[in-house]
Amino acid sequence: MSFRRWIARRARMIEGSLFIAPWAFGFLAFVAFPLAYSLYMSFHQVRVTATGIVTTPVGFLYYREILFADGGLLYDDLFPFLRQAALMIPIILIFSLIAAILLNVRFRGRMLFRVIFFLPVIFASGQIIEELIAQGEGRLAVLQELRLERYLSDYLPGGWGAPVLHVLDMFVIVLWYSGVQILIFLAGRQTISGSVYEAARIDGADPWSIFWKITLPGLMPFMLLNLIYTVVDLFTFPTNPIISKVTTENYGVSSALAWIYFAIVLAFLGLAVGLLGRIARQSAATTR
Amino acid sequence: MANIRQSIGRALAVRPAAGRLSGIRSRIAAAVLGREADKGLLFKLFLYLLLIDIAFIYLEPVLYMIVTMVKDAGDALNPAVIWVPNRLYTGHLEEAFRALDYLASFGVSLSIAGLVSLLQVLSCAIAGYAFARLAFPLKRAAFAALLFTFIMPAQVTILPSILLFKELGWINTWLPMVVPAMFGHGLKGALFVLIFRQFFSTLPKELEEAGRIDGAGAFRMFFRVMLPISGPAVLVVFLFSFVWTWNDA
């Protein structure tokens, strides 16, 4: 290309680099370095002594121990938790989608309702959630009356009965987890310009078609963002059974556990995102 | 849904003959059913009902907490007292006020949360704009790194981070909370960068092109044009950042 174009392109690259430089520095200092060190520690036995930190290399010992030898450490807690997560994620996403669309309608008191729906984000620190579940505030009183335990254990396959019951027990908390997602969907809903809706109404579309053909496709990027956020949030909540095992006793074991957990989160996330992509492609194909 | 509305409409049928009466009927029909499906009193009623139900489900634990807070020991143990205590007891509040040294703690939390959220809004907006609209070398790799930071559970890096801060001598200060926020990281920093990125990529490109034709560089574009119109995103990020840092501090 011409010399001026080349100079202009370099100038823009430099501008862009200046913008991203603080973030890049932060990444190297606060993420990349600790990450590399954590990986290094997972292959060592780390002891904190009076003089400093003593590391003795042990190779893949901890990995083998966690994955193969001592099944209880990982598997007893992991699979019920994965089933719970698989139940909670669609509930959270669908509920927050509906809530965001409702909250976008113009009606009096809209601000008040938006504040109420945002409250759980303020309260949702680990201690409070634990306390509420312990006091039984997580359940919906209505569901208690139905006495679902027997039906669930009769009609569901073995491993699913307990997770379903657990999710119902903390149904209110599941709704509480949706605060962030509702806000993201709301912000996303407002990026769809009003003129599209006006044009649709002029053409006589009814709200049902408008929802499926305009709102939902327009919210797909935010649906993806919410899905990733929900998965990550569920998996990194402090009361999570596996996270609570990451202690400071032996840094080596904890690091190995954290890395294995990270791999599991990545796998689950890849699955969920792939599923969403497939659903999106199916619905895009059928509307043509 | 459309059929129900049609049958209701037919029930309130408007006969074009008689003057004032049919006018009132059609106006009632228009008010109740609305000229379109999402206006009209019926819809508003349904909406309020649904939202109030959900709001109650949300608020019930909080209200219960508030009511329990003002019960004295007798009321708290009394199974017959659930929502209305016999007397209002402020002893718990007083004790908590003293034990937490509330005023000092409040001041500290407020200043840290405020500072961190302001810093995060600014730094994450800059990074988000760079990812959305600017070109720089290794952009794809940097975006992968961003997603990676977002997905990574904090527990993976928490131990080395503590060691790093101990090396720097920052352990008993407020610096570990504030300094990462200055660079677009910090608590859930990657989420904020992603939110800003999604938001900035929905802003019209024509605006940017017009700015560049008029000779604005990236800095001026950002601070004069993009930032002022990104009100919703700034508000959302500020709220989240404030609340989460408060809970963290």
Image: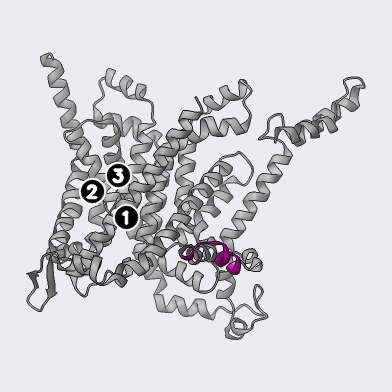
- Cα separation, mark 3 vs mark 1, equals 25 Å
Alpha carbon separation for disc pair 2 and 1: 26 Å
Q: Is residue B51 magenta?
A: no
Q: Secondary structure at mark 2?
A: loop
- The N terminus of chain A sits in image quarter: top left
Q: Magenta: predominant secondary structure element?
A: helix
* Residue under the point 39% across and 47% down: A272
Q: Amino acid at mark 2?
A: Phe
Query: Which chain does the residue under circle 3 lie in?
Result: B
Pinpoint the chain carrying mark 1: A
The image shows residue B161 at horizontal and vertical percentages of 19, 61
Residue B183 numbered mark, or none: 2
* Nearer to the camera, B115 or A4: A4
Confirm whether residue B30 shows in the render: yes
Q: CA distance from mark 3 to mark 2?
A: 8 Å
Q: Residue at x 41, y 52 (%)?
A: A230
Q: Is A235 rendered above or below residue B33?
A: below
Residue beneath label 1, please? A265
Q: Secondary structure at mark 1?
A: helix
Q: Residues within 10 Å of mark 2 (few under 14, many from 20)?
A: many
Answer with the quarter of the image where residue B221 lies.
top left
Q: Position of residue A159 (x, y in %)?
A: 45, 64
Using the image as rendered, state which of residue B63 and residue A204 is in the foreground: A204
Q: Are marks 3 and 2 on the same chain?
A: yes
Q: Which mark is residue B66?
A: none
Residue A212 in the figure: left or right of residue B164: right
In the image, the segment drawn in magenta is: A149-158
In the image, are marks 2 and 1 on the same chain?
no
Q: Are marks 3 and 2 in contact (CB under 8 Å)?
A: no
